[in-house]
Image: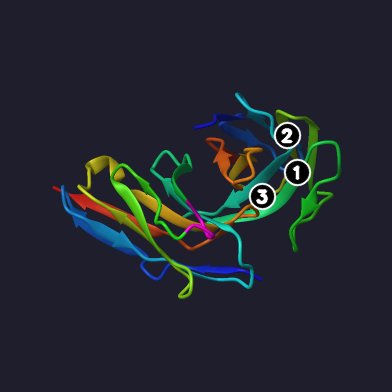
Amino acid sequence: GAVVSQHPSRVICKSGTSVKIECRSLDFQATTMFWYRQFPKQSLMLMATSNEGSKATYEQGVEKDKFLINHASLTLSTLTVTSAHPEDSSFYICSARVPDGTDTQYFGPGTRLTVL
Amino acid sequence: AQTVTQSQPEMSVQEAETVTLSCTYDTSESDYYLFWYKQPPSRQMILVIRQEAYKQQNATENRFSVNFQKAAKSFSLKISDSQLGDAAMYFCAYRSKLTFGTGTRLQVTL
């Protein structure tokens, strides 16, 4: 299957700082990428849809000013958690949709964010 | 809005045996895709199998197969000849803007 990378895999930051997470599709171009959040022992919650060259679409209840998404190229989307607080600590996962009309997404390995 | 329901939070199967994980969904659309993803302890989401709603034939991928009942909006996953490496959380998901079920934790015993 297609490969999606995510960096960093783990990050620890102080409260009030910003953290950037990168998501890259390594062997295909993705006009659409997705960002999810996963709490322990729970399912994935879609945060936003990232569209190359346009603004991201955020799900209800997700603060777009806190979770900034940029999809500057067909292989890279970034999620920046601004002014992070301990309640933002979570596992963040990105995915990229393969442009073959099948709706299939491939996922990055995830980023564990811990805000102290 | 679409919903996906997995009613089995946990399942157990002996090695080499067969297990079926259940999934039901609700939608008003007629054409769509359904997916099963696996999340092992590494937390990497891995695509297991995909079903196209307009295809009547059930999808198969080696030891993994689905029983897709469109009218009943049911999409179960059958794992044959279970292996220790199959132990994971399994999520059923509905189409592109993926709506995930709550997951089923599969344990594989010797």
- Asked if the residue under mark 1 is in contact with the one under mark 2, i.e. CB atoms within 8 Å, the reply is yes
SS for callout 3: helix
Q: Chain of mark 2?
A: A
Q: Position of residue B105 (x, y in %)?
A: 35, 57
SS for callout 1: strand
Q: Nearer the viewer, mark 3 or mark 1?
A: 1
Mark pair 2, 1: CA separation: 7 Å
Q: Nearer the viewer, mark 3 or mark 2?
A: 2
Numbered range of the magenta stretch: B51-55
Q: Earlier in the sequence, mark 3 or mark 1?
A: 1
Is residue A18 or residue A102 the one in the foreground? Answer: A102
Asked whether residue A50 appears in the rendered view, the answer is: yes
In the drawing, what numbered circle is on residue A77?
Answer: 2
SS for callout 2: strand
| Amino acid residing under circle 2 | Ser
In the drawing, what numbered circle is on residue A50?
Answer: 1
Mark pair 3, 2: CA separation: 19 Å
In the drawing, does residue A42 fall left or right of residue A94? left
